[in-house]
Image (cartoon, helix red, strand yellow):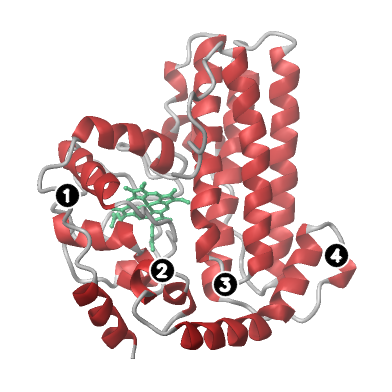
Amino acid sequence: MSKLETADTTIIRPTSELDLGRRQMFRVAGMTTLSAAAIAVLGGCRSMAATPMASEGDVNTLNVALGLEHEAINAYQLGAESGLLQKPVLDVAVQFQSHHKQHRDALVAAIKSMGGAPVAEKSMDDYAKELNAGALKSQADVLTLAAKLEKGAANAYLGVIPSFESKDLAQVAGRLAADETMHWTVLASALKQALPEKALTFGA
Amino acid sequence: MKRVLIVVALLAFPTAQARAEGDPARGQEIYESRCIACHSPDANRVGPMHRGVFGRKAGSLPGYAYSKALKGADFVWNDETLDRWLTNPQAFVPGQKMNFKVTKAEDRTDLIAYLKTLR
């Protein structure tokens, strides 16, 4: 039984608690090296990055995350170069882009430390087409796109948390989600969008 | 072992098929908050584009770099396969790279109803 399915309560409900507990322990023991290495890198302490011990699933998930960060960086670049953003909004966009660059660098380092190959960035033209940048006509259009991508990214990071074999990487995904949520909140407020009336609207 | 557990789980908890008909408008709302980071109807982004996905062979778009697992999959996207994928992609296609689950059956049904409209 794979670790991912072990984590899925709907599927494992009929198994005994005891059985689950043992698997869990086994998994934690096996994952320690990987976590130490990747987390050291994600935490900015490269020298602690130890022997890579790749979990292919986790590397894949980090690479999907890296793809999101590449796209976010380019989306803000398109916004900044569009001439549609005025100060102080432009400065905030540049600051958010710099957060995404830091996410990217941390993810690239973590993927490498796990023996994986980081996915490459596409060209600006590709991102412009994918994001339909030609349709952006005003500052509000740019902010609306950014808000949609940031909220989506927060939800994506929250959604992949249960799939990580390493709990430490799962925590990193939570921290990334927190940054994206911070961005979304600022953008939504700049757009004068109401905050959600209900709680727990993210990640569901 | 794995198979047996899944079968037992399915027998004990007949889940999934909550409502026959999904609500595509609600499905679109969910899509735009939960799928949009990675997917768009008309562009391959972090995930493959979704226009025409219903009835398409899994992992078959030419311009998108699928995982080996999904590229090698031999099934077509329909109500059942989409429901299984969204419930737990890794259990359905081990080695896939989406790793994103939709836990509520109702949400999946509505999402699938929306995906059907992307013709």
Q: Are marks 4 and 1 in contact (CB under 8 Å)?
A: no
Marks 4 and 2 share the same chain: yes
Q: Identify the amino acid type marked 4.
A: Arg
In primary-sequence order, the first of circles 4 and 2 is 2
- Local packing at callout 4 (Cα closer than 10 Å; few below 14, some 14-19, many 20+) is some
Find the distance from the CA under tag 1 to the CA under tag 2.
28 Å
Marks 4 and 1 share the same chain: no
Residue shown at 26% from the left, 43% from the top: B111
Residue on which disc 4 sits: A46
| Left or right for B115, reference A175 | left
> Residue A9 got which mark?
2
Find the distance from the CA under tag 2 to the CA under tag 3.
15 Å
Residue shown at 54% from the left, 41% from the top: A153
Q: Identify the amino acid type marked 3.
A: Glu
Marks 3 and 1 share the same chain: no
Find the distance from the CA under tag 4 to the CA under tag 1.
45 Å
Q: Position of residue A138 (x, y in %)?
A: 52, 8
- Local packing at callout 3 (Cα closer than 10 Å; few below 14, some 14-19, many 20+) is many
User: Could you tell me which secondary element the residue under label 4 belongs to?
Assistant: helix
In primary-sequence order, the first of circles 2 and 3 is 2
| Left or right for B1, reference A113 | left
Find the distance from the CA under tag 3 to the CA under tag 1.
31 Å
